[in-house]
Amino acid sequence: MTKIFSRIASIALAFALMPTAASAQQMDHLSNEGHQMHAMDASADDVAGAEEALKAYRTALEARDADAMFALFAESSAIFENGKVEGSFGNYMEHHLGPELHAIKSFTFSNPTLTVTRMGHMAYGYETYGYRIELEDGRVFERDGVATSVLSHDASGWRIVQYHSSSRAPRN
């Protein structure tokens, strides 16, 4: 019986002397002088640049300015519209939006709302809006839309890396 108590005491002592995962992680960060922890300061809450990028996209759509739109999207972006994967913005512009832009006489947004949250070098936003499209052939489309976006910030500014939009006929 004494051997059992002795073994239990030895095991308990071994466990007591082992660092826990939390203390090991803390020790790792404390001892790693080359590792800089970037504190989230007031600039992390600054969402103005990300908001401006999303507003600029809406403005470029109204102006049907493809070059301005391209400048707002990351090269490796992903576009989703009304349940369809459109691929990168370049692919979306080439196969979907680009051909539509040539047929549009006017494109206007109404009652836009925008909420953006920043998380370090990333931000996500969601929007609601109405829009009206008048085609060159006289047809008119009025829709209510929503969009969610993920943006990334680097030395060149904010770029949209993922954009998902959907719309439906207005409901009263």
Image (cartoon, helix red, strand yellow):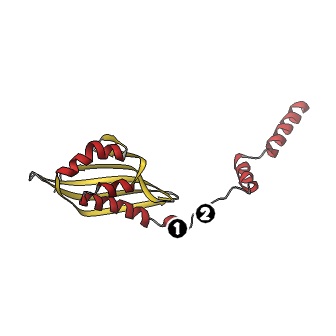
The residue that mark 1 highlights is 43
> Given the current orientation, which residue lies at the most extreme bottom position?
42
Residue extending furthest toward the left:
138
Q: In the rendered image, which quarter contains the N terminus?
A: top right
**Residue depicted at 86% across the width and 34% down the height:** 7
Residue 144 % position (x, y): 22, 55
User: Residue 135: percent from the left, percent from the top?
Assistant: 14, 53
Task: Kindly identify the amino acid type of the residue bearing the numbered disc 2.
Answer: Ala
The kind of secondary structure element at disc 1 is: helix
**171 or 124: nearer the eye?**
124
Instruction: Identify the residue shown where x is 65% and y is 59%.
Output: 37
11 or 132: nearer the eye? Answer: 132
Relative to 16, is 128 on the left or the right? left
Quarter-of-image position of residue 63: bottom left
Dividing the image into 4 quarters, which one contains the C terminus? bottom left
Q: Name the residue under label 2.
A: 39
User: Looking at the picture, does residue 167 appear above or below residue 57?
Assistant: above
Viewed as shown, does residue 24 lie left or right of 147?
right
- Residue 168 in view here: no
Q: Position of residue 153 (x, y in %)?
A: 48, 58
Taking 107 as reference, is 119 left or right? right
Identified at 82% across, 37% down, the residue is 11
